[in-house]
Amino acid sequence: MFVARQMLPAPQKVTLALLCALLSACYGGSAEAQIPTPFPLTDRTERQLRSYDAFWEGLRVDYIFSAVTDFDWSLLPPQTRRKVAAGMSDDEFEALLRSLVAGFPENTVRYRSRAERIEDDLNDTLSYEGIGAYVSVENEPSPHVILLAVITGSPAEKAGLRTHDSIYAVDGQAVSAEEGLDVVGRVRGPAGSVVTLDVRTPDGSQRIVTVTRGRLQAADRLRWEILSPAHAGLIRLPIGAGAELSGMMQRALEGLAAHQPRNLIIDMRVAHSAAAWPLEEMLGLFTEGELGSQYSRNAQRALKVNGRDLAGSQSIPLILLIGPETRGSSEIFAAALQATGRATLVGRPTPGLVLGFDHFMLPDGGEVFFGSSSYISPSGADIGMQGVQPDVPVAARWDQVSDENDAVITRAQLQFTQ
């Protein structure tokens, strides 16, 4: 398995920080790709017009950022509708919808065609096979794949790959900016097959690694330790955790308490959050009260948290490490603790992927996802629009640090002395 992280099934998108996609090698024995049954061509324009109208109608009611788009909602829909009515191929129509989506605030509206939806649904039912690593893609200074985490016991770990390593070529072919996330397709593959990777470590050393792919489950783990000389506790949050994170945190805090740490650092730089991420329980370990609000077009709900002190967790000085791979509920966690003064944030800005998404189907079988709710921090910042900004910026990327030599952690320890 070769895993990148994603919040929803969406068109692939690569930015300099990136990724927000969950992709794995998906194989199911003799399962073959199924081609959707084509629609009759005689009513193509009628079908496209109905789908076009449904696109706009579905967004008008509950899309939360309609007031901040750069286009006129009364002009653009009828103007573009004339192009559809004049006739176009299905590929041209899909391209038109994608161009419309690009006009909305980034990552707030997403579209997938009927064929993409069926392929995604098929893949959801198949087994995961590959090397066993969570990844992102970075284009600077040259395109490469970053290992966010290597799964314990995976083929990747057995071959010597480590978290923070980067892959610059797959089977002798360089990673390119044009392929973006599609490079995952060159690394993944059926169990027992072999892939050769050109790997670089954060210190710049290079090596060729051959990995025999295997079948496994996606699973990262929480790690904790005591740092010297600051005698600070360090908790590294796992990727894609769900409800189980609450128990993990409790055990980590209890384990750290035996060493009587003076301060606590929580590393959230790759903390993508699953749907069941225990936001209120996590916040309740460090603070309490009203911590901002979640809103939609029709309602606003205060985020109220009951505090629970666990081994001094309510009073210990706290620093959170954040970055472009801090996503979802973990961003809300960081924003709330920052805005109330409970924690200092060190690192790089987060992408603001805190939106709650709704979706609707189009008459042609396509699907549209749209932001229907967002989060406003206690300071009034809409995190879905601007992300979370660190109090102490540190430019070092994930592939520029290692567990043993991490400029972001070093800066966090220094912060405790100031």
Image (spheres, grey):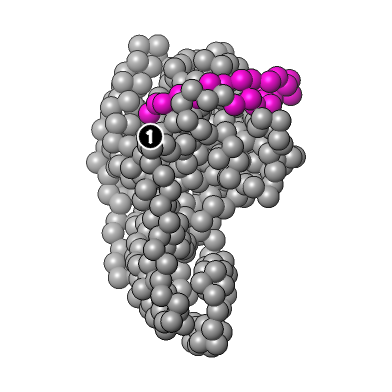
In the picture shown, does residue 49 fall above or below 301?
A: below
Q: Is residue 201 magenta?
A: yes
Residue found at x 54% / y 84%:
87
293 or 371, which is in the foreground? 371
Residue drawn at (46%, 73%), measured in percent from left and top? 66
Name the one closer to the observer, 331 or 109: 109
Q: Position of residue 71 (x, y in %)?
A: 56, 78
- Quick one: SS at disc 1? loop
Residue 93 in the image: state x and y as whole percent.
52, 73
Question: Can residue 275 be seen in this snapshot?
Answer: yes
Query: Label 1: few (<14), some or many (≥20) within 10 Å?
Result: few
Write down the quadrant of residue 237 in the picture.
top left
Tag count? 1
- Is residue 218 located in the magenta-colored stretch of the structure? no
Q: Residue at x 40, y 52 (%)?
A: 34
Measuring from the top left, give residue 286's x and y in whole percent.
35, 34
Q: Indicate the position of residue 141 as horizontal and vertical percent values.
A: 75, 40
* Residue at far top of view: 259
In this view, 363 is above or below 269: below
Residue with the mark numbered 1: 29
Tell me: 79 left or right of 246.
right
Going by the numbered disc 1, the residue's amino acid type is Gly
What residue is shown at x 74% (from left), y 40% (from top)?
142
Magenta-colored span: 195-217
Relative to 366, residue 309 above or below: above
Q: Give the side of residue 79 with respect to residue 237, left or right.
A: right
Q: Main secondary structure of the magenta part?
A: strand
Residue 406 in view:
no
